[in-house]
């Protein structure tokens, strides 16, 4: 059995935090309608991550809910906001937030409150084995939400269904086997592997069927015909490759005879390079001498501009004016030397030399250019000679090479097409091999699962033991029509009384039988160490569903009396310390005998669960008794 004890519930309102102490093995919460009794269980479930349809007072007045709980010896506090319920805060005993976890599962795999609660209860590997979860599927992997109906008998469901068997029967059935050690976590892993294997088999067979239908629908995809054509094409390609190899050898031999012409072309090419360099040098010298000529032409022009024939002031002619020898023709001043005439003579001499040098350079450039042009003609003639030779010697070989290459390319292209047509045949063989391997794997998994189930069948004595507990509780209720047989259905694990299924019983009787069933499961968990059921049971307002006449009240009295006697006695045994439990019952007015032997939490309109809330604010259901 897994230990789970509720220690304290705190509700935060605008006036602060208000606590309700719950740290007792058997608690009776009682009071008139609209005092917050059912809201107490709503708040407990809310703190544990359950979806809650709040009553008006809780939603309007309560801001946060905090539940202190001890699970497997570890005490922690769970806090959740009413208006922002998407996360639950986990606090240590000192009130420090240790972790903030999500309520709902997310695709990103973030941790949820369910993950943490199952982990604290040491139920993770049993109820949510990693391998089964990784293989996918909800079956074999459970949340704390699935365990909660075993711990909480809701007033609106207590006479309708047993642990939500009408809403989630497949999960309930498998979870029952897990909690009471009638199954093994490995069973869930094997079931998940088997489902995955069978899913893969279905996909492989569908692929193989589709592919086979395609391949048998046309002669073009006939494997024998494709293989025969492939052999023929491969022979043709080999023949073309042989011809290509022979022709290339002939081509290499023929082209070697043209090597002298190629050598001559290489030599002429080098000569052309050298001649081009000479032309460039001659052009440079011509340009240099042209610049020198232009220089002396400018100097002579400047000297001429200094010889005036008219007066620059009055514009009178100066030619007829007598000028003494050795004097300036303009100002008539005596010239002291003959420097001016000498400079003119020197300039004319240099100019004549520059003209001659330029003519010589232009002749050299013309000769170099002529030599270059002659080399170009020689090169062109030699290239034509090489082309004629190659056309005569290599042309036939080249044509044959092109033809053989085309035959090889055509064969390669067709071979590629045929090999692509064969790929589906290879894929079909691979699919057949995969199907055979998957069928072998499926059989291995089935054999392993069947062997494990055979071993688990020895555990079926657990149901006989639960039958005894259930029979004991039903007998204590003294149902007026009871004939003496109460047991669990061996296929559904649901209660059967005198051969009647749960749905066949009357409304008040269904409530009593449902409570008896949960009490029997808890009693068995206390006695049997191999059971994984948490030792907590919350029963909400059974009197509303049983009835209000004297016999109904007597039935409730016997129900309470038996439960309190059984669990109160268990609390005094040597095992109680290691197998702790908690039973909390909410009702309008529990039987007087129960009040004397349990911890009572009275609620009334002056002191409701939420201080300061008036009777009109609660929005709870009014007792119709």
Image (cartoon, helix red, strand yellow):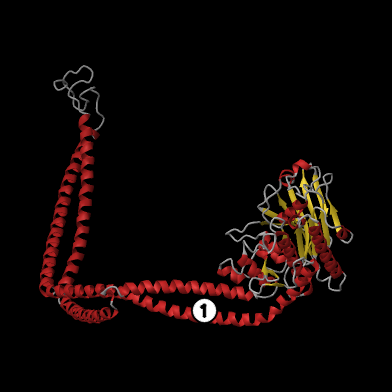
Query: Viewer-proximal residue, 230 or 152?
Result: 152
Report x, y in % for residue 513: 73, 65
435 sits left or right of 274 in the view? right
591 sits left or right of 246 in the view? right
Residue extending farthest right: 596
Query: Viewer-proximal residue, 154 or 145?
Result: 154
Across the whole image, how many numbered discs are drawn on residues?
Answer: 1
Q: Above or below — where is 16 with respect to 434? A: above
90 sits left or right of 380 in the view? right
Report x, y in % for residue 400: 15, 75
> Within the image, what quadrant is residue 500 found in?
bottom right
Q: Residues within 10 Å of mark 1 (few under 14, many from 20)?
A: many
Kindly identify the residue that appears in the image at 14 percent across and 62 percent down.
375
Q: Would you say residue 128 is visible in this rendering?
A: no
Report x, y in % for residue 370: 13, 57
Query: Viewer-proximal residue, 90 or 510?
Result: 510
**Residue wearing tag 1:** 442
> Within the image, what quadrant is residue 504 found in?
bottom right
> Within the image, what quadrant is residue 455 found in?
bottom right
Q: Above or below — where is 410 with respect to 106? A: below
Report x, y in % for residue 160: 67, 59
Kindly identify the residue that appears in the image at 25 percent across and 81 percent down.
228
Q: Provide the secondary structure element on which disc 1 rests.
A: helix
The quadrant in which the N terminus is found is bottom right
Q: Above or below — where is 138 with respect to 432? A: above
Kindly identify the residue that appears in the image at 72 percent across and 77 percent down.
464
Kindly identify the residue that appears in the image at 88 percent across and 61 percent down.
597
Query: Viewer-proximal residue, 489 or 150?
Result: 489
Q: Would you say residue 233 is visible in this rendering?
A: yes
């Amino acid at each position: 059995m897994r230990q789970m004890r509720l220690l304290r519930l705190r509700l935060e309102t605008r006036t602060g935090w208000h606590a309700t102490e719950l740290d007792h093995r058997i608690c009776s919460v009682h009071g008139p309608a609209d005092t917050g009794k059912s809201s107490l269980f709503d708040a407990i479930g809310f703190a544990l991550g359950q979806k809650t349809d709040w009553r008006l007072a809780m939603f309007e007045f309560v801001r946060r809910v905090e539940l202190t709980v001890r699970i497997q010896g570890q005490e922690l506090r769970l806090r959740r906001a009413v208006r922002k319920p998407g996360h639950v805060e986990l606090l240590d005993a000192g009130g420090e937030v240790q972790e903030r976890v999500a309520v709902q599962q997310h695709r990103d795999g973030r941790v949820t409150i369910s993950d943490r609660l199952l982990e604290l209860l040491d139920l993770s590997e049993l109820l949510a084995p990693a391998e089964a979860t990784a293989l996918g599927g909800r079956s074999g992997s459970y949340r704390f939400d699935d365990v909660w109906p075993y711990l909480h008998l809701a007033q609106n469901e207590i006479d309708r269904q047993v642990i939500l068997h009408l809403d989630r029967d497949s999960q309930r059935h498998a979870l029952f086997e897990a909690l009471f050690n009638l199954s093994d976590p490995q069973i869930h892993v094997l079931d998940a592997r088997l489902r995955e294997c069978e899913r893969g088999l279905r996909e492989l067979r569908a692929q193989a069927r589709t592919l086979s239908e395609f391949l048998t629908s046309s002669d073009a995809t006939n494997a024998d015909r494709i293989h025969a054509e492939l052999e023929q094409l491969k022979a043709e390609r080999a023949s073309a490759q042989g011809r290509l190899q022979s022709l290339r050898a002939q081509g290499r031999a023929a082209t070697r005879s043209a090597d002298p012409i190629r050598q001559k072309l290489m030599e002429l090419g080098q000569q052309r390079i050298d001649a081009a360099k000479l032309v460039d040098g001659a052009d440079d010298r011509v340009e240099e001498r042209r610049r020198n000529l232009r220089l002396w032409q400018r100097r002579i022009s400047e000297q001429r501009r200094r010889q005036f024939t008219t007066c620059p002031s009055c514009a009178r002619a100066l030619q007829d004016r007598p000028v003494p020898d050795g004097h300036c023709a303009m100002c008539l001043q005596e010239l002291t030397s003959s420097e001016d005439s000498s400079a003119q003579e020197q300039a004319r001499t240099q100019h004549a030399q520059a003209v001659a040098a330029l003519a010589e350079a232009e002749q050299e450039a013309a000769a170099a250019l002529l030599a270059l042009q002659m080399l170009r003609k020689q090169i062109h003639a030699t290239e034509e000679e090489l082309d004629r030779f190659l056309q005569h010697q290599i042309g036939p070989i080249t044509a044959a090479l092109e033809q053989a290459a085309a035959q090889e390319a055509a064969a390669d292209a067709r071979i590629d097409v045929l090999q692509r047509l064969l790929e589906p045949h290879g894929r079909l063989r691979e699919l057949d091999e995969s199907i055979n391997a998957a069928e072998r794997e499926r059989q291995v998994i089935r054999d392993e699962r069947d062997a494990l189930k055979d071993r688990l069948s020895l555990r079926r004595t657990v149901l006989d033991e639960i039958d005894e507990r259930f029979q004991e509780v039903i007998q204590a209720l003294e149902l007026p029509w009871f004939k003496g047989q109460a047991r669990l259905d061996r296929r559904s694990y649901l209660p059967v009384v005198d051969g009647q299924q749960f749905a066949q019983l009357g409304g008040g009787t269904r409530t009593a039988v449902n409570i008896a069933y949960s009490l029997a499961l808890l009693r068995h968990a206390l006695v049997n160490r191999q059971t994984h059921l948490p030792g907590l049971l919350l029963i909400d307002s059974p009197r509303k569903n049983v009835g209000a006449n004297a016999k109904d009240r007597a039935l409730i009295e016997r129900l309470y009396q038996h439960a309190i006697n059984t669990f109160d006695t268990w609390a005094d045994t040597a095992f109680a310390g290691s197998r702790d439990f908690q039973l909390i019952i909410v009702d309008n007015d529990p039987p007087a005998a129960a009040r004397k032997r349990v911890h009572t939490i009275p609620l009334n309109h002056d002191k409701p669960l939420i201080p300061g809330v008036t009777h009109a604010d609660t929005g709870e259901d009014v007792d119709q008794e």
